[in-house]
Image: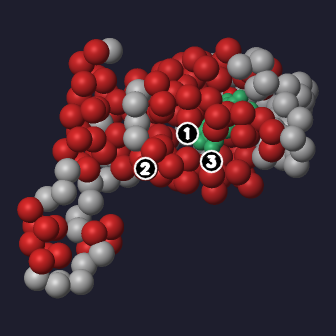
Amino acid sequence: MRSILTGSIVAIALAVAPSAAMAKAKKHHHAMHPMHKMAEKSLFERLGGKPAIDAVTDDFAGRVLADTRINAKFAKSDPTRLVTNLKAFMCSATGGPCAYTGQSMKAAHDHMGVTTGEFNALVEDLGASLDKFNVPAKEKGEVVAALAPLKPQIVEIKSPATGAPLPAAFKPAPAM
Ligand code: HEM
């Protein structure tokens, strides 16, 4: 755990250090916007790569399964499948070299009765995990921004309510 944390912090420190090329470009009025013209490392790399993503995802899954606002939804699901697929999903969603082979977000959450409040609770749990691993505000914002557009595919009930039971109609995906 310690080495993963250290690796993540080193990777982030390297990514945010202004490069000599950027300073030169500015000086010579090349009019490059640092965010767009410089080859910024992928979010995946800035987070610390696969070991860091996996560590954050393990922590995140632990928080979600302990969170009484949302954990009723996971009653019928295989935790191994969930964590394995979630790790690949997070890797892929942040620009990493992983193939996600699980269900679409629509299919995975079909008939689950997820509310807006429950979606927000899950994002809050993810934020707590990113904070625990000292992910900087910029990268934290980018992770949340990468997942926020999935809301319409996951939320079935527009309500701030949390702790809603898992509907009987929900059928879990096969265990791994
Ligand atoms: C941006 C938010 C979310 C993302 C990126 C996400 C991602 C995923 C992924 C990748 C899987 C695995 C699918 C598979 O194994 O085929 C999954 C499954 C699951 N998700 Fe989500 N999810 C999100 C929000 C939520 C919310 C808000 C809830 C409930 C409160 C939830 C409950 C579940 C459950 C119970 C499963 C297991 C489904 C099954 O057993 O078939 N998810 N999710």
Q: Residue 163: which quarter of the image? A: top right
SS class, disc 2: helix
Position of 158 compared to 38: left or right? right
SS class, disc 1: loop
Work out which quarter of the rendered image holds the C terminus and state it: top right
Position of 62 compared to 30: left or right? right
SS class, disc 3: loop
Under mark 2, the amino acid is Lys
For mark 3, what is the residue? 104
For the residues labelled 2 and 1, the Cα–Cα distance comes to 28 Å
Q: Nearest the camera: 22 or 145? A: 22
For mark 2, what is the residue? 138
Q: Residues within 10 Å of mark 1 (few under 14, many from 20)?
A: some
Under mark 1, the amino acid is Gly
Kindly report which numbered mark, 3 or 2, lies closer to the viewer in this rendering.
Answer: 2
Residue 26 position within the rendered picture, expressed as x and y whole percent measured from the top left = 17, 76
Residue 16 position within the rendered picture, expressed as x and y whole percent measured from the top left = 25, 50
**What residue sits 65% from the left and 23% below the top?**
64
Residue 33 position within the rendered picture, expressed as x and y whole percent measured from the top left = 30, 75
**What residue sits 90% from the left and 44% below the top?**
159
Q: Residues within 10 Å of mark 3 (few under 14, many from 20)?
A: few
Q: Nearest the camera: 136 or 53? A: 136
Residue 143 position within the rendered picture, expressed as x and y whole percent measured from the top left = 49, 46
